Image (tube, rainbow, N blue to C red):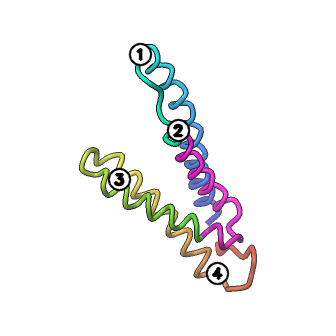
């Protein structure tokens, strides 16, 4: 379970950092052709969601954070399913990540004994 936490957290951190770097480089590239920049919410929302996912993996004993993240992951799963019409590879990566996180969520939030804060099953 610890290795799954590392993998999920590492992927979330890489996605957040990569999204910010891509947005910064993309906006300067768009300006060089006279196009307008991306909207601030397009740039800010994905890294915030990735950081919430990272926080839920770092602190699995916080059940409210886990439940909020589970709702966001379900949205990721739906978005990945809708994205499958355009690109199956990216959509499959999103589905695999969502399923891995939901399995982590199930193990931490529902299999662990209720009331035992910090009891993450191995």
**Could you tell me residue 65's position as x and y percent?**
65, 67
Cα separation, mark 3 vs mark 2, equals 23 Å
Cα separation, mark 1 vs mark 4, equals 55 Å
**Could you tell me residue 60's position as x and y percent?**
67, 67
59 sits left or right of 96 in the view: right
Q: Earlier in the sequence, mark 4 or mark 2?
A: 2
Q: What secondary structure is marked by label 2?
A: helix
Cα separation, mark 4 vs mark 3, equals 29 Å
Q: Does the segment drawn in magenta span residue 32?
A: no
Q: What secondary structure is marked by label 4?
A: loop
Cα separation, mark 4 vs mark 2, equals 36 Å
Q: Earlier in the sequence, mark 1 or mark 3?
A: 1
**Could you tell me residue 54's position as x and y percent?**
63, 54
Q: In which quadrant of the rendered image does the C terminus lie?
A: bottom right
Q: Which residue is mark 1?
A: 34
Q: Which residue is mark 2?
A: 43
* Range drawn in magenta: 43-66
Q: Residue furthest left?
A: 85
* Among the 4 quarters of the image, the one containing residue 52: bottom right
Disc 3 vs disc 2: which is toward the camera?
A: 2
Classify 5 as above or below 106.
above
Magenta residues, dominant SS class: helix
Q: What secondary structure is marked by label 1?
A: loop
- Specify the label residue 112 is tagged with: 4
């Amino acid at each position: 379970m610890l290795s799954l936490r590392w993998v999920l957290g590492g992927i979330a951190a890489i996605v957040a950092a990569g999204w910010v770097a891509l947005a910064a480089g993309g906006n300067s590239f768009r300006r060089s052709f006279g196009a307008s920049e991306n909207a601030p919410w397009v740039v800010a929302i994905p890294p915030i969601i990735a950081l919430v996912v990272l926080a839920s993996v770092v602190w699995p004993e916080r059940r409210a954070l886990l439940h909020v993240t589970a709702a966001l992951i379900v949205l990721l799963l739906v978005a990945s399913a809708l994205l499958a019409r355009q690109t199956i590879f990216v959509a499959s990566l999103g589905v695999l990540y969502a399923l891995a996180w939901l399995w982590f969520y199930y193990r931490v939030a529902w299999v662990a004994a209720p009331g035992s804060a910090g009891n993450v099953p191995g």
